[in-house]
Image: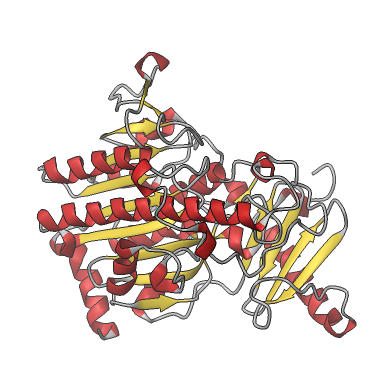
Amino acid sequence: MSRALFALLVAAAPATAAPNVVFICSDDQRADTVAALGNRHIRTPALDRMARDGFAFTNAYCMGSTQPAVCVPSRAMFLTGRSLFRVNDQLRDLPTWPETFRRAGYHTFGVGKWHNGPASFARSFDAGGPVFFGGMSDQNKVPVHPFDPSGAYPKTNLRTGSEYSTTMFGDAAVRFLTDYRGEKPFFLYLTFTSPHDPRTPPARAEKQYDPATLPLPRNFLPRHPFDNGELAVRDEKLLDRPLAEADLRRELAAYYAMISHVDSQVGRVYEALARRDVLRNTIVIFASDHGLALGSHGLLGKQNLYEHSMKAPLLMTGPGIPAGGRSAAFVYLFDLFPTVAEWCDVKPPAGVDGRSLLGVVAGRQAGVRESVFGAYRDVQRSVRTARWKLIRYPKIDRTQLFDLRADPDEMHDLSADAAHAATLREVLDRLRAEQRNYDDPLSRPPGK
């Protein structure tokens, strides 16, 4: 497809018929867990279809977190288009992505995990449910609320889901797509709790993967080489140290099975859209809120700034999207809001830090930024450029420097190598500039 034709299609779609929007989000899914993007050990046919028929960003990042529950600020960021230190977890006084589309004339429907408070959910959606106002739960007994038009969501309405969470949320999304007959374009927000631990796949999927056949991550270590400031967090206590390879393979088998089950629900959504004959005018986006270590660097969780924990899958299909498109441009998940807003001719609110990616998708731009900044609480900071990755641990005065061209798995720290002293100074300067750019509290003088 030519660039001119793509631009014409994107420009024409909102003028003739505003495109529908379907946003699907998994929980704790690494970027390297899509078969079509290089993982030959996992089965993800629906996500493979999205990669084949649409566009994949291979460097999509969560900026980080101010708390161990990384998914809370991550979702707050992509729901508002704001960066980490300019958003609050409950989205008080901050318009959300679905709320903005609701005000612009979309019928908004929310299903699944909403980790940012009932008040912001009530502002964002016309209808929806079941809704999980929490972070993690037994996948077979997730406490959920039915949609409450009053927005009160009292605990007296709370019930326990009677089926596996991914199936329950997928069922609700398919029912909506099957039954909706309104004249307004729709915005479906579907977010799963899987593959977040507890890593318990649905009964029929437990033996889908043989642990003995699954390789460990290339950067597997039995334990992290030093205290990174967050080794006592819950995620890191799920297995004993040193990590045993057999235990990790069992975790991977369960993790992959849960991702494959999420993938099956993505497939059901596509089938429902096809039955309604609305695929040609529907933007479908799949992402996760961040990645996960799961053995990489001797870690299990997402409370770190290595690539495996910061990056998430990001796939999109829709009117005008070139099939099989790929980009290694640096993007944040909070770029999605302004991207889809431009796509649908909806004006985003003031204060959005994200940048539209449509120029990248169309081939007009190579990227929208030159580096990626990361922050985790007050114990870790990072910056990545096209070649270099630096992680700074301010409380222990330790720095790591990786050459990602030669060492994409971040295994060889070059920070003490005299041959790279000038590079270290340069990347540290870039980190400090990014801290100031994003209002990082650690960039302020004491007492400010």
The image shows residue 185 at horizontal and vertical percentages of 18, 50
Query: What residue is drawn where x is 49% and y is 37%?
Result: 91
Is residue 110 visible to us here? Answer: no
287 horizontally vs 52: left or right: right
Query: What residue is drawn where x is 66% and y is 39%?
Result: 234
Query: What residue is drawn where x is 30% and y is 62%?
Result: 46
Q: Please name whichever residue, 348 or 425, is drawn nearer the observer in this view of the structure.
A: 425
The image shows residue 229 at horizontal and vertical percentages of 78, 48
Is residue 279 visible to us here? Answer: yes
The image shows residue 272 at horizontal and vertical percentages of 17, 52
Quarter-of-image position of residue 61 = bottom right
Q: Please name whichever residue, 258 or 66, is drawn nearer the observer in this view of the structure.
A: 258
Query: Is 136 rendered above or below residue 303?
Result: above
189 horizontally vs 119: left or right: left
Q: Please name whichever residue, 260 or 98, is drawn nearer the observer in this view of the structure.
A: 260
In the rendered image, the residue lying farthest to the top is 156
Query: Is 158 rendered above or below residue 380?
Result: above
The image shows residue 56 at horizontal and vertical percentages of 40, 70
Q: Quadrant of the N terminus?
A: bottom left
Coloring applied to the structure: secondary structure
Q: Quadrant of the C terminus?
A: top right
Query: Is 111 rendered above or below residue 369?
Result: above
